[in-house]
Image (cartoon, helix red, strand yellow):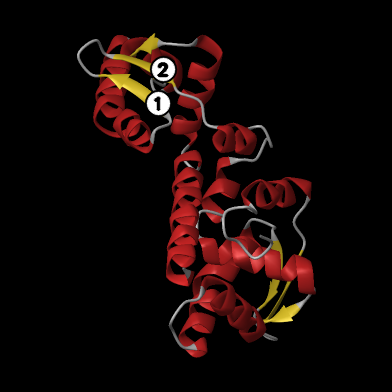
Amino acid sequence: MRDAESTGKEREKAVVNDIFEILSKTKRKEIIDYLRENGEENLENIARHTGARPSNPENIRRAKIELEHNDIPKMADFGILEYDREGETVSYKGNELVENLIDTGAETEHFNAMSDPKRRETLNCLIEYGESSVYDIANQVRRESEEDRDMYSLGIELKQVHLPKMDNLGLINYNKEESEAEYIGGETTEELLEQTSQYGNISS
């Protein structure tokens, strides 16, 4: 029973990771917004409105190819879009979490920063416990994620990858000399975390 519950949480986290990764690409977010507003559209119209800069025949052709082989299939495989390859039409299927996340008004950089569960768990940790050392954060992330890895390597990963990225975006204040971090993000970040809190994060 516990294994099944753990597997379910991992699957939910993977769903959130994928959605954040999709929304971290400006063009994909624009495609979803365009289809939410306009309903079913053909690939050429989508390319004209979301991919071609400037909008001329050659750029539209290139953008259409990119949509056809990359962005549209990825979102269709995930179940966000309905894609008719033969008719070259696309429609938005509807996804409550996707819509809720987009409607927070978050920038693509925020979605990118939060596409890794360790970063989301770090933010939740700092919100709940305040300023913390890197290894206190690592301990909390390791416990919540149930990762089977040593504290030292996880702490190094946080110090070298995740904390600097969130610091650069203004989500946290990371003191490298003291190896400490504190949360300074605003309402948008907290709303993103709230929207995903049911999917196996610290606050769930």
Q: Do the CB atoms of the residues marked 1 and 2 lie less than 8 Å apart?
A: yes
Which of the two residues, 72 or 182, is positioned nearer the viewer here?
72
Residue ID at (51%, 54%): 115
Horizontal side, residue 128 vs residue 80: left or right: right
Residue type at the position of mark 2: Ser
Which of the two residues, 100 or 51, is positioned nearer the viewer here?
100
Residue type at the position of mark 1: Leu
Horizontal side, residue 38 vs residue 186: left or right: left
Residue ID at (59%, 31%): 99
The circle on residue 91 is 2
| 128 relative to 143, above or below | above
Secondary element at image label 2: strand
- Residue 157 appears in the picture as rendered: yes
Position of the C terminus by quadrant: bottom right
Secondary element at image label 1: strand
- Total numbered labels placed on residues in the image: 2
The quadrant where residue 121 appears: bottom right
Residue picked out by circle 1 = 81
The quadrant where residue 118 appears: bottom right
**Residue 196 % position (x, y):** 62, 50
Answer with mark 1 or mark 2, whichever residue precedes in sequence: 1
- Residue 55 appears in the picture as rendered: no
Residue ID at (46%, 77%): 147
**Residue 90 % position (x, y):** 36, 17
Could you give the CA–CA distance between mark 1 and mark 2, rounded to whole angstroms? 6 Å
Label 2 Cα neighbours within 10 Å, binned few <14 / some 14-19 / many ≥20? many
Which of the two residues, 130 or 10, is positioned nearer the viewer here?
10
| 96 relative to 55, above or below | below
**Residue 163 % position (x, y):** 59, 70
